[in-house]
Amino acid sequence: MVIDRIIKGMETSDGDGVRLTRMIGTPQCDMIDPFLMLDRFDNDDPDSYIGGFPDHPHRGFETVTVMLDGRLRHRDSTGGEGVIGPGDVQWMTAGRGIIHSEMPEQIAGRMRGFQLWVNLPASKKMAPAGYQDLTDAKIPVVEKDGVTVRVIAGAYDGVDGPARTQIDIRLLRIDAAPGAKIPLHAPEGHNAFVSVYEGTVSGPGAQGAARHVDAPSLAELTGSGEVVLTAGPQGAALFYGEGRPINEPVARYGPFVMNSQDELIQAVRDFQNGRLTA
């Protein structure tokens, strides 16, 4: 693998005025199949996050919320509920339909983390909805040569993450000491990215020359095999996503992601008629 595009993201807001930076799901980076959207939020002004994400519907994909600082309460129409704090992950499978909310459980302090949207293939878009509460204590840690890897989904160095995934993906949260080497390996045909949220990493570019990725930004990795990233003089922290592309048509309308416009229309009708989660 090599470092291809480096993306700074697009400042925007979502929910009830929550300020965030969209790294995937913009005109610059529409998607990195199977990843539909990646939002990075980092605010210490309560007015930028206190409104949270009140009740809203989803169908056809999964959301993965990774908390670094702060606390969010999740509630959904399956009965799933929990508070996620630093190091915790909330994994929600919308499937055929779910209505949920994510609301801050604090009125001051820093709120920082990521939310990733993971697409589902047509064969699983109408699967039953589900919820996984992956607390920090459940997420295994691999430490080696100045690099600490938290394995959320998939495997790293023979250690499996706790997430029950619908498709072939891997999600890691990585902290590296200054100058540490970060080896990453993607199977043939997989797509991958790293979102650097602290410090700097460097690695080989498509033309052979070294490329530097400074926080906060995202780098799309292309090709297959191993890439070794090197943490900068201040160290680095990054979120790594990798998966086998689904390679199916994608039709989106707000909180619904299906394969065709007709399916989107049906999703909207089901929601309006109270049948989304039936």
Image (tube, rainbow, N blue to C red):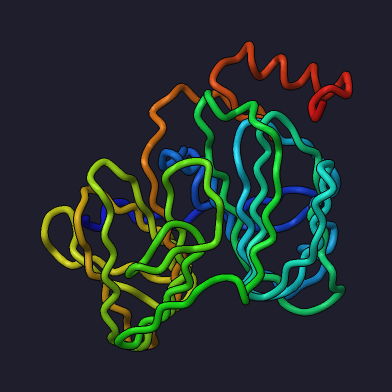
- Work out whether residue 222 can be spotted: yes
Residue positioned 39% across, 61% down in the render: 155
**Residue at left offset 82%, top offset 46%:** 76
Q: Is residue 159 left or right of residue 255?
A: left
Q: Nearer the viewer, residue 124 or 177?
A: 124
Front-most of 212 and 258? 258
Q: Quadrant of residue 89?
A: bottom right
**Measuring 60% from the left and 37% from the top, which residue is drawn there?**
61
* Residue extending farthest top: 262
Residue 259 lies left or right of residue 17; in this view the side is left
* Residue 115 drawn above or below residue 27: below
Which residue occupies the foreground of this view, 243 or 142? 142
x and y, in percent, of residue 215 in the image: 44, 71
Against 133, residue 46 (above or below) is below
Residue 213 screen position, x and y as percent:
34, 67
- Quarter in which the C terminus is drawn: top right
Tell me how many marks there are.
0
Tell me the quarter of the picture where residue 154 sits.
bottom left
- Which residue is at 69% across, 29% downward? 96
Quarter of the image holding residue 73?
A: bottom right
Q: Does residue 148 sit above or below 168 in this rendering?
A: below
Visible in this render: residue 29?
no
Q: In this view, does 9 lie above or below 278?
A: below
Residue 234: percent from the left, percent from the top? 39, 87
Q: In this view, does 104 lie to the left or right of 8?
A: right
The quarter in which the N terminus is drawn is bottom left
Q: Please provide percent x and percent y for residue 254.
A: 68, 32
